[in-house]
Image: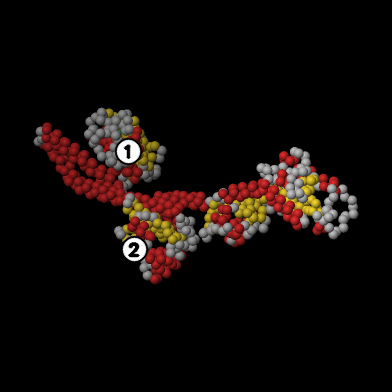
Amino acid sequence: MAFQEPPATAGRALPTFSLDLEAVFEHMPVGLTVYDVSPDFRCVRHNARFLSMVGLALQERGSVVGVTLRELFDDRSYRAIRTIFEQVLASRSPYVTNEYAAVMTPGAAPRYYQWSLTPLIDERGAVSSLLAAGIELTDRYRAEAAVQASEAQLRLIADSLPVLISYVDREGRYRFNNRAYELWFGHSRDEITGRTMREVLGDEAYAVLRPHVEAALAGRAASFEAVAPYRDGGTRAIEATYVPDVATGEVRGFAVLVSDITARTRAAAAQQLLLETSALLESSLDYDTTLARVAHLVVPSHADFCIMYLVEEGAVQRVAVAHADPAKEVFLRQIEERYPLDLNGPGPVASVLRGGQPVRGEVDPELLTLLAKDNEHLALLQAIGSRSYVIGPMRAGNRTFGALMIGSAESKRRYDDDDLALVVELARRAAMAIENARLYRMAQEAIRLRDVFFSVAAHELKTPLTALFGHVQLLQRRTARDGTLGERDRRTVEVVVAQAQRMSAMVSGLLDIARLEQGQLSLERAPLDLRALVRRVVEEIQPTLDRHTLLLTLAPEPLVVDGDALRLEQVVHNLLSNAAKYSPMGGAVNVRVDRIGGRACVTVRDEGIGIPQAALPHLFQRFYRATNVSEQVFGGMGVGLYVVHEIVTLHGGSVTVESVEGRGSTFTICLPLLAEGLG
Ligand code: ADP
């Protein structure tokens, strides 16, 4: 096989060393084929490498000598290649193909080649054959395609994640940014990738990130929370992780993962605010100061300023004004005082107060002009620089009695629906607290009026009753002495005395309650021996009892307390009367006066009906009566024990009760003993 140099190199001298061209042809790692110039371009010779490049069916033949160009390729590839063959034949100059795909076995997957086609010129100067030299690039193509596919997959994943993902090189330059960056900054990523973090984020934000960037570049992973600039000019809360790229042993850069935790942070902050507000509101019924403190809770975390309005008798009152800047707070207060809000006037606050619906909006020059009452007012409103506002109604039932407004100014914050929901909830809680305080005040007032009524009624009843009681007792004694009444009339007078006495005791009880409620029950204290006092009361009561025996046990030594003798007698009297009253079958009533620790104690034990367990904790409440006492059998108002408790407490003592229903009760009062010496 003689090789003819192509015309371009024909003038050069041939190499002088001998060359085994046959061996070169056969073993070249390049597919070599010689085609004849017959119309079919038939293969006349090829090397082993070429055979490995042809379709499988032809390969199996072991040789493709004699095979036409047409048979080597599928239709499309054949037409393209044939055009090149014809062109080389006509131009007599070699042709080098670009990399291209060809299908050598019809129906098979395309394979990639790069070819040169060189015309071989014979002695007569005619093209005798064509030498095709080709290399196959399929493997490289496949590898590249696989890399591209996996890159595309990674990019798809990165782009579909709601997290900012980037790669930053040693110079702090973004080398890759996922699509979330475009949404975050509002720029195409081409404008971000290639620029430094500092350029993209700005000096201020970068200053915060810098220590973490340095840590990542020193090979340490960093994870932190920060605030980052956002496309709207505001900021968002982020959680960032930097993962150093140490694949090759040195740090080439780091991967950045950033998630937006604004919603989470805001929800937590809102929850915290609501908790603190509720705690504040619950802490006091004095809502004027409480509301002012609530307003100050809202700034600056959620607002630059906060104002609360209440409608009182048709007029709008500002009950709280807070501003993040104390100087501006004074200023805001002055404007609010100078230009009071008109319930029927224009603007969002008035309309919330009238309609009871929350609103959210942006402040624009038209709104300020609408609100301003004169030019000076307008200038003042402009000076506040408010931007965005949210107003929530304070309501009780269908009545709107106030509004809570938060506004932004310096922070340039723009409120959204989450803020609206928060303000509505804040206003609702404030309204509830105010309403509770109002109801509480009303209840207090009703109680005061009732007590005044009690006291007046009892006083008015007391005077005629005392006269009645005195006179009927007189009548009883006189007729008894003179023996002027028959048995029936004597009994009638007895009943009148007993009932007058009962009524007198009830009125006294009511008077005591009224005095206690108004804090008017004062003690006239003096040292007294409790034993003597109890003995006196026992001796006084015993004759009035026909079915009960009072058994008195006294401590051997005097038990001196600093007490009001009359009031303490009333206490002992009450306990003894109850013991007799609630043991209708009669029996013994044990009365003891002992020293227990440093105290003097009186114990009254009966064997009567006892007290149900459930009633015990309530026994000393006024007007309380246990369920086992029926009105018909045991008359009473539930006042006695309440008065006992109050008197004993005023003495610095205590009263306790033990009882088993059906088995009797034991009441014990204990009073502090006066220091030795004094006794
Ligand atoms: P009143 O006796 O007028 O009902 P008190 O205040 O003296 O009022 O007593 C309150 C209630 O305590 C009584 O209604 C009764 O249920 C119960 N109670 C008081 N003392 C006794 C007692 N010694 N035994 C059983 N129950 C008693």
Task: Give residue 229's mark.
Answer: none
Can residue 139 be seen? no
Find out if the beta carbon at label 1 lies less than 8 Å from the nearest ligand 1 atom: yes
* Residue sitting at x 39%, y 71%: 375
Q: Secondary structure at mark 2?
A: loop
First-in-chain label (2 vs 1) = 2
- Callout 2, which amino acid? Gly
Colour convention of the picture: secondary structure
In the rendered image, the quadrant that contains the C terminus is top left
Find out if the beta carbon at label 2 lies less than 8 Å from the nearest ligand 1 atom: no
* Residue sitting at x 74%, y 51%: 115
Q: State which image quarter holds ligand 1.
A: top left
Q: Secondary structure at mark 1?
A: loop
Quarter of the view holding residue 567: top left
Frontmost of labels 2 and 1 is: 2
Q: Which residue is mark 2?
A: 345
**Residue 506 position within the rendered picture, expressed as x and y whole percent measured from the top left:** 23, 41
Of residues 271 and 82, the one drawn nearer to the viewer in this rendering = 82
Q: In the image, is 5 to the left or to the right of 356?
A: right
**Residue 542 position within the rendered picture, expressed as x and y whole percent measured from the top left:** 25, 34
Of residues 463 and 374, the one drawn nearer to the viewer in this rendering = 374
- Callout 1, which amino acid? Leu
Query: On screen, 113 above or below 557?
Result: below
* Residue sitting at x 28%, y 39%: 638
Quarter of the view holding residue 538: top left
Using a 10 Å C-alpha cutoff, classify the residue at mark 1 as few (fewer than 14 neighbours), some (14 to 19) or many (20 or more): many
- C-alpha separation, residue under disc 2 versus residue under disc 1: 57 Å
